[in-house]
Image (cartoon, helix red, strand yellow):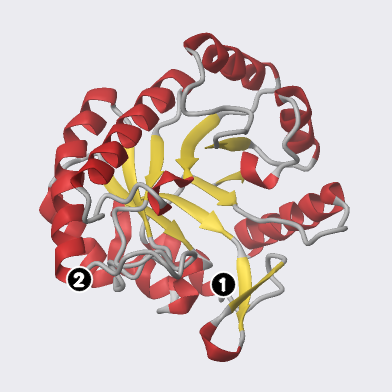
Amino acid sequence: MKKGISTWSLPDRSPDASFSLAKECGFDGVEVGISDKGLLRLDSSEKELYDFKKKADEYAMPLYSLVYDFCWHDSLSASDPDVRKKGEEIVVRQLEIASILGCDTILVIPGMVKNPGDPASEIVPYDVAYDRAFDSVCRLSEQAEKYNVNLALENVGNKLLLSPLETRDFIDKVNSPKVKAYFDVGNVMRFGYAEHWIDILGDRIAKVHFKDSKMEAKGALSATDILEGETNYPAVMAALRRAGYDDWVTAEIFPQAGRDHKEFLMKNSKAMDTIINEM
């Protein structure tokens, strides 16, 4: 397996500084997180994208997947059809950017029943959210095949696709070689066990996020450094090997305020080495 780091987990500085730090901390490649004010944006020019890729190549840091947090406000299951249309347009743009950068996967939240970060957001009936998400992903699968980029659905706190069986069946019903799962080891702690999900999703998994956390009172998750939480990484690694997974595992981690960023990255990079090489 190859060990990557999300650009969202790096200080938001220049590409040189980001790639240099990632390499110094022992990571093999970078997952590109785009944002409205980040190193790359949804409206970045083709030249900006090629320059970013060229800089990654100079540091021998492959760019392999792409994430963007639009799904929380432009949901594919929103009641407003204009919002759903905008969401689909953003996914297509992600696919285009990924193809230019050389990333083989984009992360997509397929829809949501409710945005957990916005108490005022609408509540979409589960079956309605499912049907809207399914219709959107089916349409977008054609674009994913066109760009030859995986559209990988993440398990996250969107209150939709809450079981590995349902997620597996959703992907199988779409029936596209480019629609897969982006499995987040930490996120699943809210509603299951990572190793169960991995065994059931199997070769449908395109990419994996590593993080760790502890379950607090009332079901809240408290982020920890990797290997300091409650994730059963020996079981996770055994399940990934049963699934034949040998692709990127990406640290999607964020230091607490005031903590030395480099020390934080170094520590978690070494923890990932322990997981990959010793478990």
Instruction: Please tell me whether residue 16 is drawn above or below residue 184 in the rendered image.
Output: above
Residue at 83% x, 49% y: name it: 261
User: Mark 2: which secondary structure?
Assistant: loop
- Please name which of the two marks, 1 or 2, marks the residue nearer to the observer: 2
User: Which quadrant is the C terminus positioned in?
Assistant: bottom right
Q: Mark number for residue 194?
A: none
User: Residue drawn 20% across and 62% down?
Assistant: 129
- Residue 225, position as x, y percentages in the image: 72, 66
Quarter occupied by residue 136: top left
In the rendered structure, which disc, 1 or 2, sits on the residue that comes first in sequence? 2
Spatial CA distance of label 1 from label 2 is 37 Å
Q: Position of residue 72 (x, y in %)?
A: 42, 53
The residue carrying mark 2 is 125
Q: Quadrant of residue 79?
A: bottom left
Within 10 Å of disc 2 (Cα), the crowding (few <14, some 14-19, many 20+) is few
178 and 86: which is toward the camera: 86
Q: Is residue 57 left or right of residue 180?
A: right
Inspect this view and state whether residue 6 appears: no
Q: Which residue is mark 1?
A: 234
Residue drawn at 55 percent across, 34 percent down: 36
Q: Residue at x 15, y 64 (%)?
A: 128
Amino acid type indicated by mark 1: Pro
